Image (spheres, rainbow, N blue to C red):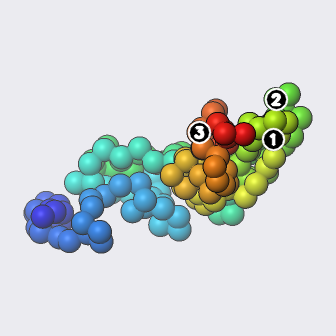
Amino acid sequence: MKFECSQHLWRKVQFAGGGGYDCNFFAPPNTPKDGDACNCFGKLDCTYDDCGGRGQIHAWCDNTTWHVKETACARQTCGADGSISCGPGDVCVFHDNFMPTYSCVPNPCGTMTTSCDCAASICGSPGLCSMIDGSVACICPAC
């Protein structure tokens, strides 16, 4: 059973999937704006890449008010020597195999923070995904 605080009163609510508020609940295009109310949402610290819209968004709720900082999406360096430049909306991928390679691919995580939860598909099978400094590292222990 979940409860929601609305107009200073608690009431029973049912969230989709049975969960409560988390960063996914406020994903683009529904990201909060600075100063929006977030009473009873708990303490949230969310980061979104909305490079086609508002840019990189860092939003945190202190259980009363959203505090939002927006910055322009920037290109990120990629490769052992930083010689590759990935554009906004792309993620740097390192493939650790016989000949290690680096490449930029569209970020399968979309507007959410890049993690192996959503980016593991880049590695394919039998690759294992790990995150290194914001890049996806595909490790193949059997290769």
Residue closer to the observer: 43 or 32: 43
Q: Residues within 10 Å of mark 1 (few under 14, many from 20)?
A: some
The quadrant the C terminus occupies is: top right
Query: Which residue does the image show at 27% across and 61% down from the upper left?
Result: 19
Q: Give the CA distance from mark 1 to mark 2.
A: 8 Å
* Residue 80 appearing in the image: yes
Q: Amino acid at mark 3?
A: Ser
Secondary element at image label 2 = loop
Residue linked to disc 3: 130
Q: Which residue is mark 1?
A: 102
> What is the x, y in percent for residue 64?
28, 49
Q: Quadrant of residue 110?
A: bottom right
Image height of 83 relative to 73, above or below = above
Q: Quadrant of residue 76?
A: top right
Depth order, front residue of 82/42? 82
Residue that mark 2 sits on: 80
- 56 left or right of 14 in image: right
Q: Give the secondary structure at mark 3.
A: strand
Residue farthest along the top direction in this orientation: 81
In the image, what residue type sits under mark 1?
Answer: Tyr
What amino acid is found at the position of numbered circle 2 in the picture?
Answer: Ala
Q: In the rendered view, does 81 fall on the left or right side of 36?
A: right
Q: Tell me what residue is drawn at x 41 percent, y 44 percent.
A: 45
Of callouts 1 and 2, the N-terminal one: 2
Mark 2, other Cα within 10 Å: few <14 / some 14–19 / many ≥20? few
Residue 120: percent from left, percent from top:
59, 52
Considering the numbered disc 1 on the image, is that residue within a helix, a strand or a loop? strand
The mark lying in front, picked from 3 and 2, is 3
